[in-house]
Every structure is written in structure tokens, then in C-alpha cells.
Image (cartoon, rainbow, N blue to C red):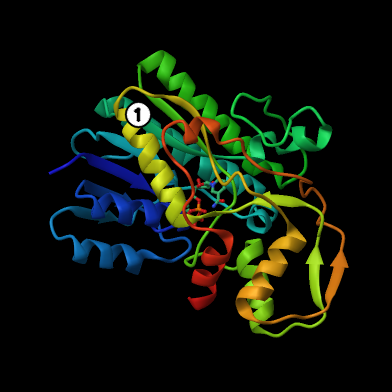
Amino acid sequence: MGARILVTGAAGVIGFELARQIAERGDELVAIDCGKKGGLEDLDALKAKHPGRVTVMHDDLAQGPLELDGRFDAIFHLAAIVGVQYVTDHPYETLVVNLRSTLAVLDFAIRSKSGPFFFASSSENYASGVDAGFVKVPTPEDVILSIDRIALPRWSYAASKMAGESAVFGAASEHGIQPVVVRFHNVYGPRMGQTHVVPEMLARVKQRVDPFPIFGADQTRSFLYVEDAGRALLTVLDAARNGASGLFNIGSPDEKRIDELARVIFDVTGFHPKLELHPAPPGSVARRAPNIAKLAGLGFAPRVGLEDGIRACWKR
Ligand SMILES: NC(=O)c1ccc[n+]([C@@H]2O[C@H](COP(=O)([O-])OP(=O)(O)OC[C@H]3O[C@@H](n4cnc5c(N)ncnc54)[C@H](O)[C@@H]3O)[C@@H](O)[C@H]2O)c1
């Protein structure tokens, strides 16, 4: 038996892929998710595929202390409320769930003296600084984190992620846990819901919407296919088990304009509508791309190009 690993948010887009890769490589997995977004049946299928090595728990981490037996060689805390629209509509719930669940999992990590603690954080934490002009793009890990207008509901998510990062480093200095904060940058994949630019555009292609609305055509993002995100996490895990800690960007270095993304989607799907250009939604950040030199230094490079990743999503 390999390592014993806990993954929270294991029914989610990234969490499930990570869980799958952990189980495939022979480690023991405890997977927790409350099923807020579905996907629990995929976890049950994973458990059936790896008898005796995968435990699935349908728990709401925000509801109270996390009680589990024994220690873990690593903990990945990915469970969170995610998605700009949901967060904008539920800013208080976002803070309550994200903060309570992070503190519950951290408290357990401290009590159980578990190994490296991975916290899923976000490029949202420095996004305001890009627009304000004091954060460069591609963005490395050691940047000033900031929030543009704290009263705007959408920033509750970044606030919860900044507080989470701070809690992880605080627990490290006060209780000796090994802190690993991973900042994800636009991870996408076939199990995604509809609230992300890739599935949103694919849904419009499916409905043959013509003219095709594009919001913020000249904004940029970098897109990482979920399988690569899972491999990146395992790369950092292996480094962490050899003592590495701190902040790691996880994303693709390939910065794409939103209209370029649309063209890839049209090429893959064979649908070529006229474009109808609209301004970006309010609060949407102009540019976002990570500097992944630190991750690349551990031997990671993305393998799945945007076209192949989109094709996999389209097939699903
Ligand atoms: N996908 C990205 O590009 C991206 C970017 C930045 C940060 N992140 C972070 O990475 C993590 C995973 O993101 P994702 O895209 O897989 O999101 P996701 O929404 O697909 O997965 C999150 C999972 O957490 C679960 N969850 C939520 N609240 C819970 C609770 N109280 N108890 C138990 N489970 C709970 C949900 O049911 C869901 O399955 C999140 O923390 C997210 O903030 C992701």
C-alpha cells in the first residue's frame, strides 16, 4: 500500500480527477464531498473500481468538526463554494462555507499530525492588482494580494481564499503543519457544470446560436485541462513529501484571448457563426496568466493542448 491521502471536494472537477489519479497510482484514498454539485456517483464508481483502497464520505465540512481515524500522509483541501455567479448571489454563504470548512479540515490536520496540507487557492487573490497595474502578467507566486472593492459580493470568494491561505500559513507557524498553497488558474474539463466560459460557449454551440455573443473578446485567460491539473498536484505532492512547501501556481503558461478561445471552439466543433461582441461583465479581470516556473522546476509541463482539451469536453 502506498500513501494514505485525504481529498476534500473530491466529487468536483479537480477533486475527482485528483482522486482518480491517486487511486490509479495505488495510494489509499479517503474522499469527502457533500455532493453540492453532484458527481457522487463517480466517486462511488471509483470506490468500486479500487476495492479496499477508496473510502467515500458524503459530509458537509462546514457543519462541524471533522472526525476521522488516524493520520494522513497528505491532505488536499479542495472543497469550496466556487463560481462567479453563485458567489455573487451568495456572498455570505461563500464566506461561511469556505472559512468553516477550511478551519475544520485544518483543525483535523493539526490534531492528527498529518503530512503536507494542500489548500486550493485562486488567481482571484491577485486579480485586482493586475487591473490596478501593480501585478505583472504572467504572474509569479510572490505578489501582493488585494481586493478591489470589498463591498462587491463577487470578492467574497477571494476574501475566503486569502483568509484560507493565511490560516494555512498561520497553522504552519503555530502548529508545525507543512503548508502547500496551490493557486489554480482556469482549470477546465468534461465534468464541469455550465458556469465557466468553456462549457458556456460549448452550450451555445450546441444550440447553434448565431450570431454568437462573446463577452470581453480582448480579455485573456490561460486554460489548463483537468488531467494536467491532477498531474501538477501529484508533482507538487511528491516534492512536498521530500520537504517542499509554500505557494505554487498551477495553470498553463499559454495566455489566450477570449476570442481566440472561441475560434478554437469553433474549429473543434465545426460551427462557424458570426461574432457579436459585448463588453466584459463588470468586475471581470482584463488579463490572467500564471508564471509556472516554480512548478516547471519540479518537472511539470502541461501535456493536453487547448484543442484536445476542448475536444474531450465537446465529446462529453
Ligand atoms: N477550477 C478552477 O479553475 C479553479 C480556479 C481557482 C481555484 N479553484 C479552487 O479549486 C478547488 C476545486 O475547484 P473545482 O473547479 O474542482 O470546483 P468544484 O465546484 O467542481 O468542486 C468543489 C467541490 O467541493 C464540494 N463542496 C463544497 N462545499 C462543501 C462542503 N461544505 N463540504 C464538502 N464538500 C463541499 C462541492 O460539492 C464540489 O464537489 C476549489 O477550492 C476552488 O476554489 C479552482
In the image, residue 196 sits, relative to residue 161, either above or below, namely below
Is 47 on the left-hand or right-hand side of 126?
Answer: left
Badge 1 is on which residue?
240
Locate the N terminus and report the quarter of the image it occupies. top left
How many numbered discs, if any?
1
Which of 63 and 221 lies nearest the eye of the viewer?
221
* Few, some or many residues within 10 Å of mark 1 (<14, 14–19, 20+): many
Q: Amino acid type of disc 1?
A: Ala
- Residue at 33% from the left image edge and 37% from the top image edge: 75
Where does residue 53 sit, x and y in percent of width and height? 17, 53
Where does residue 123 sit, x and y in percent of width and height? 62, 40
Is 108 on the left-hand or right-hand side of 28?
Answer: right
- Residue at 55% from the left image edge and 45% from the top image edge: 251
Asked whether residue 219 appears in the rendered view, the answer is yes
In the image, residue 33 sits, relative to residue 233, either above or below, namely below
Where does residue 113 sit, x and y in percent of width and height? 26, 25
Q: Quadrant of residue 261?
A: bottom right
Asked whether residue 10 appears in the rendered view, the answer is no
Residue most toward the top? 174
Where does residue 155 sit, x and y in percent of width and height? 70, 42
Q: Is mark 1 within 8 Å of ligand 1?
A: no
Which of 273 and 68 lies nearest the eye of the viewer?
273
Q: Secondary structure at mark 1?
A: helix
